[in-house]
Image: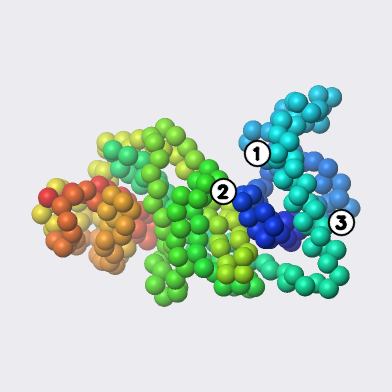
Amino acid sequence: MEPIGTYYMNVGGVYYPELPIRHVNFTQGDSDHTSFNNHGYMGIYPFEDYQNYSPYIHTPNDLIGTSVTSFEMSQQYCQMNIACLAEIANPMGETPQVYCNPVRDFDIELPVWKDTSPLWLHWKSPEEGSTGEIERFDVYRDNVVIGAVDWVDSTYVGYWGYEYMDTITVGAEAEYFIMAVYNDGCEAPSQTEIGYGVSAVEESESNVMVYPNPSNGTFNLNLGAGQWNVEVYDITGRKVYENRMDGRSVLDLGKCRKGVYFLKAMGESRGVTAKIMVQ
C-alpha cells in the first residue's frame, strides 16, 4: 500500500502542510480498508493517534461523542480527501507525481552517562531513485521537530552515517523518526524508534579504561585489541574529535576547552562509551 500512502502524504504536503502526516505500521488490528486490500485494491485509512484510539471503535457505542470527539479533525480529514480526489480527477495531469525514499538503518543507541540520559540517533542516506534531490533530515520526537541535519555528500559522512544527539529525562521515553525532506516538496518518514531515558549503572564505565580522568587533555585509552573509531562530543552534542586508532592509544584533547565531554568508541564487534573531563 506504499504508493497510495506516499501519494496521500505528498498531496498533504501541498494542500495541507500544517497537518503532520506520517506512515505507521499498525499491527493491532485492521479496518474498512482491509476489504479493498484483500481484493487487490490499494487502500489506506488516516488515524489520529494509533496509541490512544477510542475503545468504542467497531462497537455499538461507536458514535459521535464517544468515538468522534473532534469535529475539527474530521474537517481536516474531509479536506484532505477532497484534495486527493481533486488531484486524481485532474484530466491533464498538470501536477507531476513525486516520490521519495526514506532514510536507511535508522537506530537509537543508549550511551552511558551518569548525570543525564543522552540518546545517539544515527541513520544513512536514502536509496537512490527519488524524483527530487535530498535537502535535509528533520528529527522528530513525539511528532514534533526538534532539530534538522543538512544533507552532505557521502564523502563527508562517517561510518555510522548521519548523527543527532538528544537528551531526555531519566525514566521517560519518547518516539523518534527521521523525515527525509526533498527539494520537490516530497517528504519520506523513517520507521519509528523508541528512545528510553536510562539511568546508567556506576559500574558501566568499568568496561572502558580511560585514564587519567579528569585530565589536562591527554588521556590514555585501553579499549581492547583491534582498530577503533573514536569520537568525542561536547555537552551540546557537537563532535569535537574523530579518529581511527588502535585500542591502546593516546587521546589528545589539548585544544579543547575545559569541561565535560562524551567519548564514543566503536570497535569491530562492540562499542563503548564514557564521560571524560578536561580540566
Tell me residue 237's x, y (percent). 33, 53
Mark 2 belongs to which amino acid?
Answer: Thr
Kindly identify which numbered label has been placed on residue 40: 3
Q: Residues within 10 Å of mark 3 (few under 14, many from 20)?
A: few
In space, the residues marked 3 and 2 are separated at their CA atoms by: 27 Å
Question: Considering only order in the chain, which callout, 1 or 3, is on the residue closer to the N terminus?
Answer: 3
Q: Residues within 10 Å of mark 1 (few under 14, many from 20)?
A: few
At horizontal 37% and vertical 61% (from top left) the residue drawn is 268
Asked whether residue 126 is in view, the answer is yes
Asked whether the residues under the numbered discs 3 and 1 touch, taking CB atoms below 8 Å apart as contact, a structural biologist would say no
Mark 1 belongs to which amino acid?
Answer: Asp
| Residue hosting label 1 | 49
Kindly identify which numbered label has been placed on residue 192: 2
Question: Considering only order in the chain, which callout, 1 or 2, is on the residue closer to the N terminus?
Answer: 1
Element under disc 1: loop
> Quick one: 250 or 24, which is closer to the camera?
24
Labels 3, 1: front one: 1
In space, the residues marked 2 and 1 are separated at their CA atoms by: 14 Å
Tell me residue 188's x, y (percent). 61, 60
Asked whether residue 265 is in view, the answer is no
Element under disc 2: loop
**Is residue 240 toward the left or the right of residue 153 in the image?**
left
Asked whether the residues under the numbered discs 3 and 2 touch, taking CB atoms below 8 Å apart as contact, a structural biologist would say no
**Is residue 91 toward the left or the right of residue 44 in the image?**
right
In space, the residues marked 3 and 1 are separated at their CA atoms by: 27 Å
Tell me residue 130's x, y (percent). 63, 71
Mark 3 belongs to which amino acid?
Answer: Gly
At horizontal 39% and vertical 36% (from top left) the residue drawn is 169
Tell me residue 254's x, y (percent). 14, 61
